[in-house]
Image: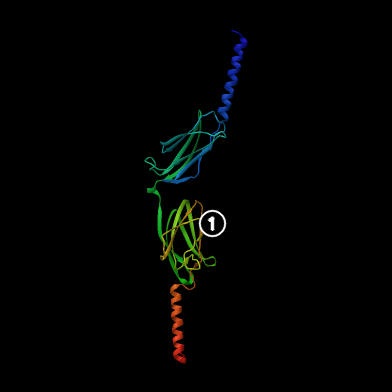
Amino acid sequence: MDFRIFYGIIVLLAISTGTVNAVAQTLEVSVQTDDNNYDEGDTIVISGNVSIVVGNTPITLQLFSEGNLIDIAQVIVAQDGSYSHTVIAEGPLWKKSGNYTVRASYGDGNIAEAEFSYSPKSAVILTTENFDVDAGSSGTFDVKYTIKGGTVKDMLIDEEIFALIVQIESTDEGVITLELPREFIGAEKQDGKDDKFIILIDAIEVDYDESGSGYTESRTITINFERGDSDIEIIGTYVIPEFGAITMMILIVGIMVTVLVARNKFQINI
């Protein structure tokens, strides 16, 4: 055997082995979810990167709950090394609350993991209560509310901007529904018809939903919030009006009585 060929083969093997080892040493995988907490029915977005794309090799994603496999998928990796996959948190395997693990595997031994917490509907806490709001010289009034994902710390009136300020402690993304009594707070157009409220969460304007139609004693609005949000400002066109409907009726009756007394006293013909 020609020793030159033999040594050439040895050199090629050494080079190829070194290249494989270099790739194995430098290939890195990352994985994360778009949130840290999910409820049943939520969409979980799993994404990440690989530092070196190896041909058409897909990345394998596995979801575990207490060591039990609940979902698996193989996802195509883009040319830039990125990948993304969505999972709906529902089904027969999504019954236990607690920490879940997502594992991303790429090639031989390249693994990354991330964790998130999950709560089924049976474990989601909904709080429904009445809050006694201080209305100053007008006394107090009740605001009925339901909240998920946090707790209500306080409700305050800001008469200067015609607002009810709801202070919350949000432990997760959630939702709050409030029944606002028209007698004390509202948003109306000049013709007396309902207008939209302006809703600010930590000084940022957000949308809201309103349920019910027609005139009722209260307006029911639903507002979504994110984890860490604290102040919800509900701004209308009036708050604790100086002359409410009842006060105005009393004022009108008082004026009529005054006119009648004056007419009888001075015998004025009207």
Which of the two residues, 170 or 185, is positioned nearer the viewer here? 185
Task: Classify residue 14 as left or right of residue 121.
Answer: right
From what the image shows, is residue 151 above or below residue 42? below
Which of the two residues, 214 or 78, is positioned nearer the viewer here? 214
Task: Classify residue 217 as left or right of residue 163.
Answer: left
Give the colour scheme of this rendering: rainbow
**Quarter-of-image position of residue 69:** top left
- In the rendered image, residue 186, in percent from the top left (x then y), is placed at 47, 65
Which of the two residues, 200 or 35, is positioned nearer the viewer here? 200
- What residue is rendered at 46% in x and 58% in y? 152
- In the rendered image, residue 110, in percent from the top left (x then y), is placed at 52, 31
**Quarter-of-image position of residue 175:** bottom left
- In the rendered image, residue 5, in percent from the top left (x then y), is placed at 61, 11
Q: Quadrant of the N terminus?
A: top right
Instruction: Find numbered disc 1 in the image and state the secondary structure of the residue it sits on.
Output: strand
From what the image shows, is residue 168 above or below residue 4? below
- What residue is rendered at 45% in x and 81% in y? 254
Kindly identify the amino acid type of the residue bearing the numbered disc 1.
Glu
Within 10 Å of disc 1 (Cα), the crowding (few <14, some 14-19, many 20+) is few
Q: How many marks?
A: 1
Which of the two residues, 93 or 45, is positioned nearer the viewer here? 45
Residue at the outermost right position:
4
Disc 1 marks which residue?
205
- In the rendered image, residue 188, in percent from the top left (x then y), is placed at 49, 66
Residue at the outermost top position:
1
From what the image shows, is residue 195 above or below residue 114? below
From what the image shows, is residue 212 above or below residue 245? above
